[in-house]
Amino acid sequence: MRNCHSTRADLRRVPCGNASPALLYSFSICLLSERRDMSSPPELDPWDLDRLRLPAELVGDVASRRRPPRHRSGDPFIKGPIPYAWIASACRLPGAGLHVAMAFRFYRGRFRFKPRERRWSLPDVAKGLRISDDSARRGLHAAELAGLLAVEREPGCKLAVSVLDLTGPESRPERRPLYGPIPRSWWLPASRLSGKSLHVGAVCWLLAGWERSAGFELALDGWADLGLSRFSASRGLDELEWAKLASVGRTPGRSPIVTILDAGAGSGLP
């Protein structure tokens, strides 16, 4: 006897009025066998991916990524993106070089449409950063020598400072820029902390931009190109946590999990 497929093909070719009783009988048997097969449970596919999934009760809730803090409407902020080569060179400056370089970068972004207001008094910058005039002067000189800032000095006039966008190779993932924006209400308290706290703050904002999340895993080593050792990175992270600029989750044997906090409501600094 021919199989069901050939029987159905023969039936399509033969008009119903001319179909023989034997052919109709064979077709009925095929339909009954197919109905019986459909009623039986299907065999499990050994390559079915659904069989590899965890039960629903074993799957935890996947929390959505928390967005990094943003400045409020009308509040000042540091504009991004900042090339990685620029921020890395600024972090390697001695003394208050990073503080001063980022201060002038902030001023450039805030007054970019007001050329007449692009002259600033160095004592005012020092006062805002809460550092001495001499520290601000040395920091500005170091940033100028590194090619990060260009300074025009005229007798009896305030300094005219321009930011030079130092570029470098950024093809590798670890060479992506600091995207920003960074609220000034966060950066300014961080710049007033001791040690390399501001350098660690720069690393935090780098990772927040790369991960597009306020929370991330921060490896304490591997930041030598930003002037940080493992010890200085750990101390700086403790300072940011004390100032309530970041929360830190620590697990033995793993890198800390850092979350950048919104400093709009105030920090631990006076």
Image: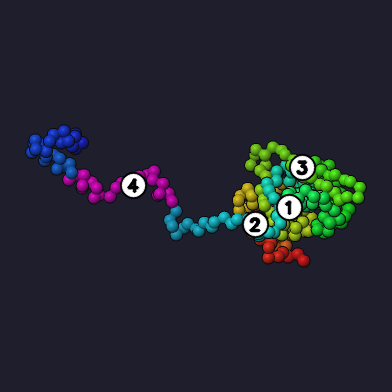
Horizontally, residue 262 falls left or right of residue 96, namely left
Cα separation, mark 3 vs mark 2, equals 26 Å
Q: Which amino acid, by three-letter code, is at mark 4?
A: Leu
Tell me which numbered mark, 2 or 1, is placed earlier along the sequence.
Answer: 2
Tell me where the magenta segment starts and ends, as one range.
32-53
Check residue 191 in the rendering and tell me which mark sits there, or answer none. Answer: none
Q: Earlier in the sequence, mark 3 or mark 2?
A: 2
Sequence-wise first label, 4 or 2: 4
* Distance (Cα) linking label 4 and label 2: 52 Å
Q: How many residues crowd around disc 1 within 10 Å: few (fewer than 14), some, or many (20 or more)?
A: some
Does 132 sit left or right of 215 as displayed?
Answer: right
34 sits left or right of 68 in the view:
left
**Helix, strand or loop status at disc 3:** loop
Q: Residue at x 80, y 58 (%)?
A: 128
The earlier-in-sequence mark between 4 and 1 is: 4
Question: In the depicted view, which residue is nearer to us: 155 or 128?
Answer: 155
Q: Which residue corresponds to mark 3?
A: 164
**Which residue carries the number 2 mark?**
70
